[in-house]
Amino acid sequence: MGNVLPEIVVLDLKAALSGEDERGTRWAYDAAKAIAALQGIVNRRRPNLFLRYLSNGLMRERSQPTDSCSLDTYWLNWLRQSDRMLAEHTLVETDKICEVFTRFADSIHGIVIWDESVPSTANVAATLAGAKNLIPLRGSTAADSFFAQFRELLPNIPVEHDLRDMFTGTGKIPETTLGSTGSARCDAYLWAVENILRNGLCSPAYLAYYVDGIPWNTVAPKSLPYPDLGNAGVLNADYWISRQAFFFDLSPWSDEPGTDDPQQAPGTDYRTLISILEAANEMTQGKRMITCGGFVPWWLKHCRANWAGRNPDTSKHDAVPAEWRFVDILTAHNGMLDADAYGLTGLTNASVYQHCKLRDKYLQSHSGSEKTYDPKKTYVLFGMLDYDSAAWLAQAIPANWDDPNRGKVPLWWGFNPILSDRVPMVFDHVYSTLTPNDTVGADEGLGYVNPNLLEGDRKFSTLPPAGEMYLQHAKPYFERFSMTTTVFVIVGDQVPVTERTLQILAETSPDGIGFQGGDRVRDGVYFGTAFKQEEQDWFYAMKPEETAKALEHFIRQKGAGGFVFFRCILFSPTQIVKAVEQVRQQAPDLDFEVLDPVTYFRFMKKEKQP
């Protein structure tokens, strides 16, 4: 009996939230937030609790009604296959939330109550959940609230922290020597810095940037309070709570107040963000890179992209600059992003997935290594992106990697290797099913960083250079996955690319590097490595005729001996295969060849080497 593996509880959260979820209620949000915290607590050492909740938007849009349309079922089935992590475990299925909390009650050390009038306290509560094994609950006096029902279910669990009415944005920040920032939102985060982060109760090496507990209809009047738990990242919290991360949601802009906190002085959010990052580096003693999950919640706040119907729209900044700005600030503070961006934000069960063991070494081959350069041909390279988020990667694999046409043309896949910490099973699946026409490199790097801010003028920090520290952290990941290329480096508006940046990139990716377009770096060979700018971004919604037209245009423009490179965002192999076939049919006069990246960059070096 000693060899019997423990049971895994599988909660059908979609069924448990039925009705409440569709109405976007506080009850649904609060139940999901509490369950995610419980998952992070009970799965910290080994897998105990699995959720079924997320559908797979990409599969649904492509009309593939299979188990792949349930993201959680897809990966649970994978984990249950012979010799995999959960193959021998017994599954205990339920759709009753109360049963789950009762079963794991002994793992709960207490409750932390957060204050809806200060939505940032929801993130503070998530930080406390990981630090002290607490369940975060929105304070409510309503008899039908999740708070009331939880207290009735487990009346003996103590309240360890009550954050209600604690932060007012005036006077001194409670339990600190700090004066108020003038923003209750920011005061709550600085309280957490002083009382949790600096006291060593959470990990300074893990941060979580997810939208706070604000009801969406308070800033977007036509919205439901919580219309989209997946894209709100509520259920992503399990992994970060298991790693005892520090949660926050702050604007990266120094020249305006937060769009959802307009009474604060301009830059208050920004200064609070800097305080968090500085404290994290003090606690790591600047000796390791910091991983941050999440993304700027641009659809709702911190910029003027108004997808959620925000009114009025008060920011002067657009969404992409907000993304770049945050990554710049993070990189300057020795951080890298696991970028759970809107659209495919949701990732359930990463606290389970993290226990999937990887092999020490994964190999890949390059089918075109014996090819000979032909100056009469135009050479084409397809970068399959954007996989700089564990959530995007886990959601896209069933739609894109499992595509039956993968392997028919050479494709260059960009998977940031740091994502293997959160979704290791994806990497095992990918490397177990490689074809000779698949090459896997990093997306932007180890994680999403701006390499121009690892050294030199770091702009947003006074920290010493971190290039060597980054390389020490990155190289074991690149070596494990036999990655010798990076598909799409982003430096945003921090230009020009420095010599040191080129050297750092060349050390991890000697076989070639793809680059963001614009006036950033010229195509050429630097430190023995070939660099190539993209020609164009292609988003997966492009029609086949549009893709073929663009491909033909750039092949003709570059001409014989030319090199073209495309960033294909969430494209499936089928879309690429059809575009290539269509160009060959419509333009038989064109002499072009699609290459793997190692061969492509070898040919480029032959032409570009000074």
Image: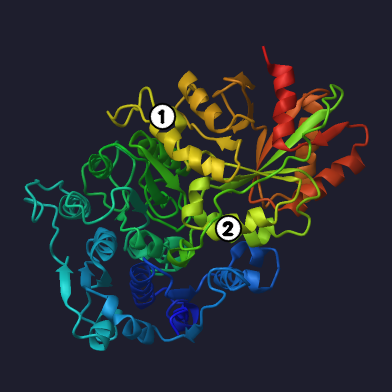
Question: x, y (%) of residue 405?
Answer: 78, 55
Using residue 307 as the reference point, say whether residue 169 is left or right of it: left
Q: Residue at x 26, y 73 (%)?
A: 137
Residue 605: percent from the left, percent from the top?
70, 21
Image quarter for residue 24? bottom left
> Can residue 230 be spotted in the picture?
yes
State the residue lying farthest toward the top.
610
**Mark 1: which amino acid?**
Gly
Secondary structure beneath label 2: helix
The reply, left or right, for residue 538 in relation to residue 471 is right
Q: Quadrant of the C terminus?
A: top right
The tag earlier along the polypeptide, 1 or 2, is 2
Q: Specify the label residue 279 is tagged with.
A: none
Q: Which residue is mark 1?
A: 467
Q: Nearer the viewer, residue 189 or 419?
A: 419
Q: CA distance from mark 1 to mark 2?
A: 28 Å
Q: Nearer the viewer, residue 466 or 348?
A: 466
What colour scheme governs how the chains and residues are painted in the rendered image of this protein? rainbow
Decide: few, some or many residues near mark 2? Use Cα within 10 Å; few <14, some 14-19, many ≥20. many
Residue at image coords 72%, 26%: 602
Please give the name of the residue rendered at 20% of the width and 86% of the height, measured from the top-left corner. 155
Q: Which residue is mark 2?
A: 426
SS at mark 1? helix
Q: How far from the left and from the top, in percent, is residue 332?
A: 35, 33
Choose between 81 and 325: the one closer to the eye.
Answer: 81
180 and 600: which is toward the camera? 600
Q: Residues within 10 Å of mark 1 (few under 14, many from 20)?
A: many
Q: Amino acid at mark 2?
A: Val
User: Residue at coordinates 13% horizontally, 65% vertically from top-left?
Assistant: 165
